[in-house]
Image (spheres, grey):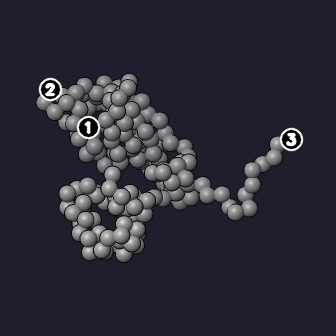
Amino acid sequence: MDELLRILQRNALESHENIARMLELPAAEVRQRIADYEKRGVIRGYQAILNEDQLDLDKVTAVIEVKVTPQREGGFDTIAERIGRFPEVRSAYLTSGTYDLLLFVEGRTLREVAGFVSERLSPLEGVLSTSTHFMLKTYKRFGVFMHQPSPDERLSVTP
């Protein structure tokens, strides 16, 4: 992967000037390369990584494994795109193993997510089965640990 993309993955707010210094390139070239990546769709957006456990959100996240029947025309893509259009689906991946798709779904309550699964996802043509796992706590997200120990926090000594 291009080092420029690695820098942006670590910190999308890094200034073009700082990136230019790190890569020993002119800032104008960095700007142009970023614009090119955005235009080509390599860079699809920028967002902050939040520790949502510290926010007072009315939100539940579930990881849902979905077994599907691939379509004659379009294979897994057609049904994955159809499922991905639901606003509750935040991420969707094709996976190997027992299940074909891995979804990250958000709702305001457990009941709302359960309703999505039972009333909208499971009845879809081509969906054979689902397995839903509710996320209880986030330890690490996008390579970032959510808990940062305070400077005086020490390992406990056990007798």
Vertical side of 70 occupied by 46: above or below? below
Q: Residue furthest right?
A: 159
What is the three-letter code of the residue carrying label 3? Pro
Q: Quadrant of residue 70?
A: top left
Q: Earlier in the sequence, mark 2 or mark 1?
A: 2
What residue appears at the point 45 percent right and 51 percent down from the top-left corner?
142
Viewer-side residue, 6 vs 85? 6
- Tell me whether the residue at label 3 lies in contact with that at label 2, contact meaning CB atoms closer than 8 angstroms: no
| Mark in the foreground, 3 or 1 | 3
What residue appears at the point 37 percent right and 39 percent down from the top-left corner?
103
Residue that badge 3 annotates: 159
Crowd band around label 1 with a 10 angstrom C-alpha radius: few (<14), some (14–19), many (20+):
many
What residue appears at the point 42 percent right and 63 percent down from the top-left corner?
11
Residue that badge 2 annotates: 72
Vertical side of 97 occupied by 47: above or below? below
What residue appears at the point 34 percent right and 33 percent down from the top-left corner?
95
Residue that badge 1 annotates: 80
What is the three-letter code of the residue carrying label 2? Arg
